[in-house]
Amino acid sequence: MLAEARSIAVLTGAGVSAESGVPTFRGAAGLWRQFRPEDLATPEAFARDPKLCWEWYDWRRGLIANVLPNPGHAALAKLECTLITQNVDGLHQSAGSKNVIEVHGSIWLLRCTECGRAWQDFSPSLEIPPHCDCGGLARPGVVWFGENLNPKVWAAAERAVRTCDVLLVAGTSAVVYPAAGLVPLARSAGATIIEINLEATALSHSVDFAFTGASGVILPQLVDR
């Protein structure tokens, strides 16, 4: 099916990055076990204490800067596809993927809260809190809890799954909306759904093929074959 597909879309989640050593937000080692989301990842939290918010994001940036893409990232980079990711770490681009849609933004992107200018900074450590050239306070270029997704980015993701013949879903629990809604959207458009995850998810019973195991093992096998 992958070989015959005219168009392939991929949806990836935290599980793909976890295989590179990036902690997930859920699970036994999840980042949220140490912090409450409302204390660090909401517009209200940033307005209340931007320094605390940025200290956490700067710590995450430093952690991510020390990890490398895994074989799953590399396999997807070889696949001609539209890659939709819920991850903000940029590892898909580091692996060589070109057509990447980051629905939750990027941890390497900064956006000025005054003038709106956005820029990338890949430094593993920033001056906390960072500021724009205009003097305005910068915020992380990610989508926080309580915020809407970028409508242009979301429209591109919907378009990709509506027009694909095959949708690969890798390393995601398929419970975080609206990204999880892309799967039934692809299904309604007639796409074949292939899931790859370490364990069964709420999605597993409704896909065409469910492979249980590490995406860094299974994705290279699928792409090579």
Image: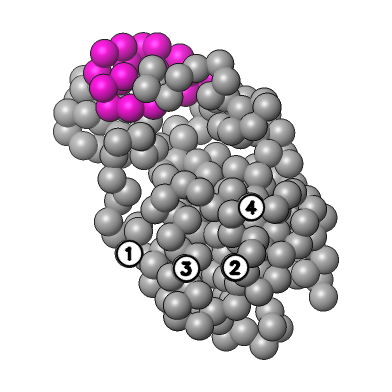
Write down the residue under mark 1.
Answer: 155
Estimate the x, y position of residue 31 in percent, counting from the top left. 57, 24
Q: CA distance from mark 4 to mark 3?
A: 14 Å
Say if residue 92 shows up in the picture: no
Q: Quadrant of residue 36?
A: top left
Q: Which comes sooner in the sequence, label 2 or label 3? A: 3
Query: How far apart, in angstroms, are the residues tagged by discs 2 and 3?
Result: 9 Å
State which tag comes first along the sequence, 2 or 4: 4
Gap between marks 2 and 4 measured at Cα: 10 Å
- Give the labeled residue for mark 2: 206
Q: Secondary structure at mark 1?
A: helix
> Could you say which is closer to the camera, residue 96 or residue 202?
202
Mark 1 Cα shell of 10 Å, populated few (<14), some (14-19), many (≥20)? few
- In the image, taking residue 79 as reference, residue 51 lies left or right, namely left
Is the C-beta separation of discs 2 and 3 under 8 Å? yes
Q: CA distance from mark 4 to mark 1?
A: 26 Å
Q: Position of residue 201 (x, y in %)?
A: 63, 52
Mostly what secondary structure, the magenta segment?
helix
Eye-nearest disc, 4 or 1: 4
Q: Residue at x 62, y 84 (%)?
A: 5
Q: Specify whether residue 113 is painted magenta.
A: no
**Which stretch did the figure color magenta?**
41-59
The residue lying at 29 percent from left, 39 percent from top is 147
Residue receiving disc 4: 201
Write the residue at 53% across / 44% down. 87
Residue 174 visible, this orientation: yes
Which residue is denoted by mark 3 in the rendering? 184
Mark 2 and mark 1 lie on one chain; the one further toward the N terminus is 1
For discs 3 and 1, the disc positioned in front in the rendered view: 3
